């Protein structure tokens, strides 16, 4: 594997290089800079797509691994690779960045905007592929910086407040993560004499009950804020709403997934025992998030905030799947990370276009958009229905797997979360009716329908939403083996009696296989 | 021959795709003809498949075809596949047949509508989803069809979306159905957790692994799903609002096909029902209660479509009652007969509405028999059929249900007979108010004096009326009591087997029961004819209690709607922004207070902190590089 093309490293560095180029392009016309940024993100997408095609199905370990020792005394190395879980998150991110760059442009200072966006892309990809905890932490933190500037620089009225809240809240969470990472590495050193931050090595560290629980909580603090999980979510409605369209798209679709991905990758792998012990807590927060997010969404009068709270509910579903510890639940959770990314980005993109036309997201001021803009309404319906979980579209497959998977081990949590399916229909259909149905008022009646550029930009999302709903098998076939390794490890270490129906046949030493793949 | 069965699904799907992308260019009326052609092709495939199936011996009339693997994760293997057997083909036959006729009718009815092509986009997608629902070989794919028809129903009810009432009615239908759908989903989870498959045949083979309580729970959850889709108590009241949709939609989706899906689902799952007598009593009770309640409401409605809508709810109540009794064949027989006569009644109502330029108020009709002779003649057949007058199809099918219910429970049978009287009553009331008495359509509405002359519909709308009238008249031959062993019962026998309830009643008793049915029909008809023939204005017979649907909507609004809204507002304005966010900001200000002394070192600008993060990262990187 190591002799093959270094896809992963290229994917991390390419957008950053683009960002530097954009920042240095003071003399180049803005149109050209914007086109250049889209081109860079498209090339990145091309590499990600090629990597996904080359990715071997049926292998649950890490592939395309690059490992270069970098700071020997500190045990830090450039150690990157993808498995069936991260490969689709990378692909999802690389699909969304060109769409955000092409579809949600800014009027002021586009050079800086696209530079921050490309830097953000590098940080997101880097977080998904890092197998070294220090590098993960760096990427995880660095992602805040461009997002902070995007919100505060190109946001709406309350942007300053929203940006500060976002930044301070997430940095506060990350402080726990940094301490946690260092403690994990030191404990590992005390047990083996080797200082390393490599995940496959660290995951064989043994933690005593209390230490494991405390470390789990430290890691979870950062991820729960980032995702965000109830009750650490209050920064998100403000940030999602005040950010410019492109910012909202990436923030809700990609950045949030750093949190849920962190829960799955680091919490479960490093602290399987604590994960099992604390699963009821996380499941409860997840279910509360599903129901609470939905209920609060019902009371919003602003289209963007409706989507923001619906996002909270969807993140709850993801966490429910992750902590169900079943093949179906975890696979559903990973697929939902991808699906929620596509759907939420689509909704924020279209809401941005509505704002460009009507300069408002207040539902009471929008009315009858479907009459002048039937294509906009059609695109919005398809994406909204995917969010509601209508079968045939992508959201259903993941939601079904999450609920089924959690039902098998945690029946009553699943039953409670299933009722959330009704709420999604209530607030989204209500919002759709407010914005699109009814007789248009004069300001709306003259609104333009989607332009050809806009159609081209939104079409990939709609196509993917349908495709992943009808034929998710290729994706599932690649996610499932990696998920099974995680479950096998959790079950092995926590020594809980295996649930006969759901637990996979696991190789006795799951960790060694991953390590083997990494060599 | 059976391998071509999946073409039944393909044709409407192709029609949908073509119309969705090129509908506007194809335009009016070609889009309608294209839509109709695809359904006709589907119908032909259904006929061929049916013939192929009938050619086999009774025991081997079951054919499964897997199309592709849909959701394979761990032990879960969901394939998109179809199950061709007598039950699914009976459904497919009348679904494609009635859809074809109603597509044809729509060509005329929707003429000139701004969104004419879009109507056929939805209608074709609906037929695809409906066929997927009945042909699926597993619960999950059936659920795709189940939600798909619900979605099309939402779109078609809200078809005239500029009208607020239509948009709200569509939303209401979707949400009520969603409540039922959670039951469907939970039933799938429960069944899978015990038998590890979602395939019908696998579930039936391992049904004993479910255990008693889980079986009862699963059946009741499926019943919840059925009450949503088939508009039964407690989720019935969306169907009346659904009349906001164009009338062909009411005929096809909200009378003939989609709303019977709940009955189909319960019949399909009959091996589970047989294991849970408790649950079947609940089913029978819900069916009987809905039949009666909806029939009383139909007696007091003024809107011609709402009368027929509540009538539909009531008739499906009979079908659910039959399913609860175990008389599946009677349920299916009534379903097919009902599709003919109710489709006919709706299309007839559509013809009236069309002829009176969108008038739907019965009190503003009258004497139409002179202006709309075709509509009158065909509607007459539908009216007599639903009223249960021999020898029309409604008489035989309802008789079949009641005969079986008699053997299960005399009390439920009595409810059924009273409902039969009410059925004849409300439909006669509608009939005489629309076609007899004095013409009232020229009375002024508000400040709009009406000058209109009713006009008969074009032939594309009349032909379907005649076709459906024929089947509404003669549909009874599917399963006449004295040919029971060669009719529908023997055809469906492989599906239901010994689980089919059969009342072994003496010939004398059967004749007695049938006579009571006939008397009930004639009685209701006579009473209504006497009361309404001469006078259209009888407020005392239309109490508010019935007009307002037993205050059912008001009740839901009081106990769910308003508390729900209050909870949502409280959560958003108090819990979220004051309590949770308040705690966060509180901690933040505590930190700020504690750090007051450090304030001079801090600029307070987050962008400086952000730059700091970048600088810190660079510093660490440099540090690390120098050490290696």
Image (cartoon, grey):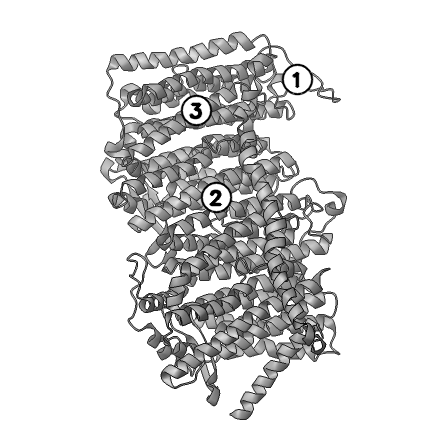
Report, in whole angstroms, how far the alpha carbon at label 1 lies from the one at label 2: 39 Å
**Which subunit holds the residue at mark 1?**
B
**Mark 2 lies on residue:** B148
Q: Earlier in the sequence, mark 1 or mark 2?
A: 2
Report, in whole angstroms, how far the alpha carbon at label 3 lies from the one at label 2: 26 Å
Asked whether the residues under marks 1 and 3 belong to the same chain, the reply is: yes
Q: Quadrant of the N terminus of chain B?
A: top left
**Which subunit holds the residue at mark 3?**
B
Callout 1 environment at 10 Å: few (<14), some (14 to 19), or many (20+)?
many
* Nearest to viewer (mark 1 / mark 3): 3
Relative height, residue A171 to residue A336 (above, below): below
Residue in the foreground of this view, choosing between B48 and B514:
B514
Callout 3 environment at 10 Å: few (<14), some (14 to 19), or many (20+)?
many
Label 2: which secondary element: helix
- For the point 39% across and 54% down, which residue is it? A406
- For the point 25% across and 18% down, which residue is it? B505
Which label sits on residue B441? 1
- Residue A32 in sight: no
Give the image quarter of residue B582: bottom right
Q: Earlier in the sequence, mark 1 or mark 3?
A: 3
**Mark 3 lies on residue:** B291
Label 1: which secondary element: loop
Residue in the foreground of this view, choosing between B273 and A37:
B273
Q: Earlier in the sequence, mark 3 or mark 2?
A: 2
Report, in whole angstroms, how far the alpha carbon at label 1 lies from the one at label 3: 32 Å
Give the image quarter of residue A54: bottom left
């Amino acid at each position: 594997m190591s002799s093959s093309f270094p896809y992963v490293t290229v994917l991390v560095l390419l957008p950053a290089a683009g960002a530097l180029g954009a920042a240095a392009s003071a003399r180049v016309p803005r149109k050209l800079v914007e086109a250049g940024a889209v081109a860079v993100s498209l090339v990145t997408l091309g590499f990600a797509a090629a990597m996904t095609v080359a990715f071997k199905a049926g292998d649950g370990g890490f592939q395309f691994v690059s490992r270069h020792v970098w700071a020997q005394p500190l045990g830090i190395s450039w150690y990157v690779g993808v498995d069936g879980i991260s490969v689709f998150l990378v692909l999802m991110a690389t699909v969304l960045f060109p769409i955000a760059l092409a579809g949600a442009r800014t009027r002021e200072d586009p050079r800086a905007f696209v530079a921050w966006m490309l830097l953000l892309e590098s940080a997101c990809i880097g977080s998904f592929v890092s197998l070294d905890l220090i590098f993960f932490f760096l990427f995880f933190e660095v992602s805040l910086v461009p997002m902070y500037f995007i919100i505060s620089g190109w946001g709406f009225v309350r942007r300053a407040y929203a940006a500060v809240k976002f930044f301070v809240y997430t940095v506060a969470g990350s402080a726990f993560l940094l301490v946690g990472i260092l403690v994990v590495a030191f404990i590992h050193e005390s047990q083996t004499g080797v200082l390393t931050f490599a995940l496959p090595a660290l995951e064989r560290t043994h933690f005593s009950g209390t230490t494991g629980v405390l470390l789990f909580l430290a890691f979870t603090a950062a991820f729960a804020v980032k995702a965000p999980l109830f009750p650490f979510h209050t920064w998100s409605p403000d940030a999602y709403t005040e950010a410019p369209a492109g910012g909202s798209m990436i923030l809700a679709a990609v950045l949030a997934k750093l949190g849920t991905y962190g829960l799955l990758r680091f919490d479960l792998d490093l602290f399987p025992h604590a994960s099992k012990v604390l699963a009821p807590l996380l499941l409860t927060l997840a279910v509360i998030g599903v129901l609470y997010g939905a209920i609060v969404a019902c009371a919003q009068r602003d289209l963007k905030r409706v989507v923001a709270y619906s996002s909270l509910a969807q993140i709850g579903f993801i966490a429910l799947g992750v902590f169900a510890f079943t093949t179906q639940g975890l696979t559903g959770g990973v697929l939902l990370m991808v699906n929620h990314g596509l759907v939420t980005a689509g909704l924020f993109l279209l809401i941005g276009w509505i704002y460009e036309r009507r300069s408002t997201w207040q539902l009471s001021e929008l009315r009858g958009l479907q009459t002048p803009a039937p294509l906009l309404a059609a695109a919005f319906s398809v994406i909204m229905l995917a969010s509601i979980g209508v079968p045939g579209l992508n959201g259903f497959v993941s939601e079904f797997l999450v609920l089924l998977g959690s039902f098998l081990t945690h029946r009553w949590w699943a039953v409670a979360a299933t009722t959330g399916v009704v709420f999604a229909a209530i607030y989204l259909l209500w919002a759709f009716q407010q914005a699109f149905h009814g007789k248009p008022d004069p300001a709306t009646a003259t609104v333009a329908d989607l332009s050809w550029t806009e159609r081209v930009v939104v079409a990939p999302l709609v196509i993917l939403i349908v495709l992943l709903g009808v034929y998710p098998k290729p994706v599932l076939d690649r996610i499932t083996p990696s998920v099974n390794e995680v479950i096998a490890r959790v079950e092995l270490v926590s020594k809980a009696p295996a649930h006969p129906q759901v637990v996979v046949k696991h190789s006795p030493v799951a960790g060694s296989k991953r390590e083997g793949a990494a060599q | 021959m059976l391998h071509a069965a999946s073409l039944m699904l393909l044709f409407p799907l192709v029609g949908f795709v073509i119309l969705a992308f090129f509908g506007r260019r194809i335009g009016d009326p070609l889009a309608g003809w294209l839509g109709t052609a695809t359904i006709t092709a589907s119908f032909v495939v259904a006929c061929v498949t049916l013939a192929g199936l009938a050619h086999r011996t009774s025991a081997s009339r079951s054919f499964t075809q897997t199309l592709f693997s849909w959701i394979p994760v761990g032990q879960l293997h969901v394939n998109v596949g179809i199950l061709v057997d007598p039950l699914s083909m009976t459904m497919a036959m009348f679904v494609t047949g009635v859809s074809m006729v109603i597509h044809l009718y729509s060509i005329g009815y929707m003429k000139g509508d701004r969104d004419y092509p879009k109507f056929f986009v939805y209608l074709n997608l609906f037929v695809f989803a409906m066929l997927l629902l009945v042909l699926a070989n597993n619960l999950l794919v059936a659920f795709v069809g189940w939600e798909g028809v619900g979605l099309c129903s939402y779109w078609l009810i809200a078809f005239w979306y500029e009208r607020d009432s239509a948009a709200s009615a569509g939303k209401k239908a979707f949400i009520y159905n969603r409540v039922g759908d959670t039951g469907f989903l939970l039933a799938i989870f429960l069944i899978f957790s015990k038998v590890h498959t979602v395939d019908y045949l696998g579930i039936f083979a391992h049904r004993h692994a479910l255990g008693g309580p889980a079986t009862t729970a699963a059946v009741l959850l499926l019943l919840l799903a059925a009450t949503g889709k088939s508009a039964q108590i407690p989720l019935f009241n969306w169907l009346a609002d659904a009349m906001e949709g164009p009338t062909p939609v009411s005929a096809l989706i909200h009378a003939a096909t989609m709303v019977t899906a709940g009955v189909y689902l319960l019949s399909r799952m009959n091996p589970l029902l047989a294991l849970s007598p408790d649950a079947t009593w609940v089913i029978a009770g819900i069916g009987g209660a809905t039949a009666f309640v909806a029939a009383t409401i139909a007696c007091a409605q003024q809107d011609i479509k709402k009368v027929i809508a509540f009538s539909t709810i009531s008739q499906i109540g009979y079908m659910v009652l039959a399913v609860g009794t175990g008389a599946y064949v009677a349920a299916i027989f009534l379903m097919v007969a009902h599709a003919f006569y109710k489709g006919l009644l709706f299309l007839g109502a559509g013809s009236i509405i069309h002829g009176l330029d969108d008038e739907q108020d019965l009190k503003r009709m009258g004497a139409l028999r002179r202006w709309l002779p075709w509509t009158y003649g065909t509607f007459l057949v539908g009216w007599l059929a639903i009223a249960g007058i021999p020898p029309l199809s409604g008489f035989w099918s309802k008789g079949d249900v009641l005969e079986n219910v008699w053997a299960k429970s005399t009390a439920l049978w009595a409810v059924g007979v009273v409902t039969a009287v009410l059925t004849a009553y409300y439909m006669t009331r509608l009939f005489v108010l629309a076609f007899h008495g004095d013409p009232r359509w020229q009375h002024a509405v508000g400040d709009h004096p009406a000058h209109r002359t009713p006009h008969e519909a074009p032939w594309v709308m009349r032909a379907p009326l005649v076709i459906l009238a024929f089947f509404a008249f003669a549909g009874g031959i599917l399963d006449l009591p004295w040919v029971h062993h060669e009719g529908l019962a023997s055809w469906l026998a492989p599906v239901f087997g010994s689980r089919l309830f059969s009342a072994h009643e003496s010939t004398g008793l059967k004749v007695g029961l049938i006579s009571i049915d006939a008397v009930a029909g004639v009685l209701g008809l006579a009473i209504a004819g006497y009361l309404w023939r001469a006078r259209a204005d009888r407020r005392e017979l239309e109490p508010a209690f019935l007009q307002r649907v037993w205050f059912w909507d008001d009740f839901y609004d009081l106990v769910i709607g308003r508390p729900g809204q209050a909870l949502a507002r409280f959560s958003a304005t108090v819990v979220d922004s004051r309590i949770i966010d308040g705690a966060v900001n509180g901690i933040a200000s505590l930190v700020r207070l504690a750090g007051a002394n450090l304030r001079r070192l801090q600029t307070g600008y987050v962008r400086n902190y952000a730059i700091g993060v970048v600088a810190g990262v660079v510093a660490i990187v440099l540090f690390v590089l120098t050490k290696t």
